Image: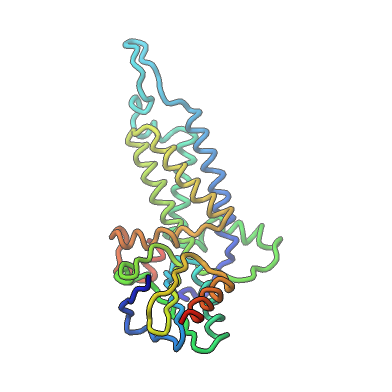
Amino acid sequence: MTAPVGIDPRSPRFGAGITAVLLLVVIFANLAEGWWVSNSATGVTVSTLSLQNPLQRLLSPSVLLFAALVALFAWGAFAGIRRHPYGVVFRAVIRPRLKPPTELEDPAPPTFAQGVGFIITGVGLALHLAGVPYALVVAASAAFVAAFLNSVFAYCLGCQIYLLLVRAGILSRKSGSKGAAAA
Amino acid sequence: MTKSIDLPDEVVLGADATLLQFSTEVCSPCRATHTVLDAVANSRNGIRHVDLDLTHRPDLAGQFNILQTPTTLILDATGTVRARIGGAPTRATVLAELDRILIAA
């Protein structure tokens, strides 16, 4: 309707599959990195995050991987799903081994889903860097559920929540079609 | 159980029934549903398919209480809502609902 050229609908599902696996890695790695330490002087158990500054909170393997996923969501949301690195991999490696798509898809729905993923993971990362325990695991888990459903069942996030966000006044109604695609 | 609604001016009713679809730009199944409903409308006389894009019309979403897209309302000849289908319907589902409504009319 709005896009001159459609995309292969399997491309965003392929990307969501990679994202889902990486989010699982983040969740388990982050939980394995340890949460609570006992202060040897007082014997009080405290969150390790409370002993760190924001840079130290960023510099663990799981948080760095999570930050990379946030950046990838931002890439898909603001540059458009067609310029996403997973889309490039799909076209170069996966697409030639598959049958041609039976139909092409408007890039606006998966681009919207990337924006939702960016908001959820971005808030989780910001709260983690601010020292909130479990914020990263909660955000990564929520994003994992959405990415898994998208990848395996072609779940359409935009169908279910777009109107709810607009009606709640969270998404602006004045944005044009280009703005809506980036929202 | 029937309910009359105030339809936007751009909606022209079919002689026997109207398939009133609600879509948005961020909804990919809406495209497939558009194709299914168009085919149903073209296969029978007196059936009209209208697709309303709610992307920039939250007022309509509120008026019709649309929470997800696609949502399809089936209106009878008088414009009364007789069926409501959430999600992407199959052709068989739409035809069965139409039969039920048109036989009752």
Res A31 seen here: yes
Find the residue positioned furthest to the top.
A41
Q: Quadrant of residue A38?
A: top left
Task: Please indicate whether residue A25 sits to the left or right of residue A180 in the image.
Answer: right
Task: Please indicate whether residue A173 sits to the left or right of residue B19 in the image.
Answer: left
The residue sitting at 52% across, 57% down in the picture is A155
- Pick whichever, A163 or B1, lies toward us: B1
Up the image or down, A57 lies above or below A125; here it is above
Q: Position of residue A82 (x, y in %)?
A: 52, 63
How many marks on residues? 0
Up the image or down, A159 lies above or below A59; here it is below
Q: Position of residue A156 (x, y in %)?
A: 49, 60
Quadrant of the rendering where the C terminus of chain A is positioned: bottom left
Name the colouring of the figure: rainbow
- Pick whichever, B21 or A28, lies toward us: B21
Task: Please indicate whether residue B8 sits to the left or right of residue A94 in the image.
Answer: left
The residue sitting at 33% across, 15% down in the picture is A44
Find the residue positioned furthest to the front.
B104
Q: Position of residue A182 (x, y in %)?
A: 40, 62
Q: Quadrant of residue A129?
A: top left
The residue sitting at 33% across, 62% down in the picture is A166
Res A79 seen here: no
Up the image or down, B31 lies above or below B103; here it is above
Q: Position of residue A128 (x, y in %)?
A: 37, 37
